[in-house]
Image: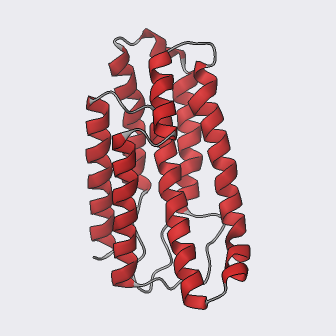
Amino acid sequence: MNNKQSRILNIITFLAFTILGIYKNEVTVFYIIYLFWMEAFVRQLIELSYIIRRDSKLFSSISVAWPAFFMMIIYVVFIIVLFGFIPFSAGKDSETFLINVKTLMFKNIFFNLSVLVYIIQYILYIYVNGFKEKTIIPFNRNHIILHISIILGAVIQLTPIVSFVKPKELINILSIIPFLILKIILDKGFKSKGESILV
């Protein structure tokens, strides 16, 4: 499984579960941004486990990788508060709020399947191609995707245009399309042998 094959497979599985989730009305802006974060987080966990196993240095490996994980903690708090709860704190759109809570509590089947398939796919990729990086860098491609997603999500949720769109299902679809495009454009897949890690 080379870099191009991994990228194509990742995009296909992401789109498949997301489109099914949209059809079942289980996908929100929070769902997408939280999924981007979860992919980046589990990827860092997998990479850290390989580094610890390879170097046999538990505490030093964790210490070096800590800045990257600390940044992820800041991201997830910001994402949960800004996109999961604040927009619905006044009791508006309780249905979307419940979907967000289900997603956060891992009770959204489409979200769970997306994360599970991503984990299996990335572990398989490393198993086939190896992992050569010395440590986990604190700012990478996934962080860039998160940055852009947060800005894009804020624009979508704060724009007054969505209040004129009916029905509600159409609002969700129109809100999620930009994130799907973002995923396809910016997600360059996994790392090939001899390349710098594309995260």
Q: Give the side of residue 19 with respect to residue 68, left or right.
A: left
Residue at screen point 47% across, 82% down = 131
153 to 46, vertically: above or below: above
Residue at left offset 72%, top offset 79%:
59
Rendering quarter of residue 181? top left
Identified at 58% across, 40% down, the residue is 150
Q: Give x and y (percent) for residue 169.
A: 34, 20
Rendered image coloring scheme = secondary structure
Q: Is residue 8 above or below residue 29?
A: below
Query: Where is 41 relative to 170, above or below?
Result: below
User: Along the horizontal axis of the image, is 6 left or right of 105?
Assistant: left
- The answer to whether residue 14 is visible is yes
Residue 48, percent across and down? Answer: 57, 74
Can residue 29 be seen by looking at this rendering?
A: no
Q: Quadrant of residue 173?
A: top left
Which residue is at a point 53% across and 51% down the rendered structure image? Answer: 37
In percent of width and height, residue 11 lies at 31, 55
In-image side of 175 versus 117 (left or right): right
Pick the quarter of the image with the N terminus: bottom left
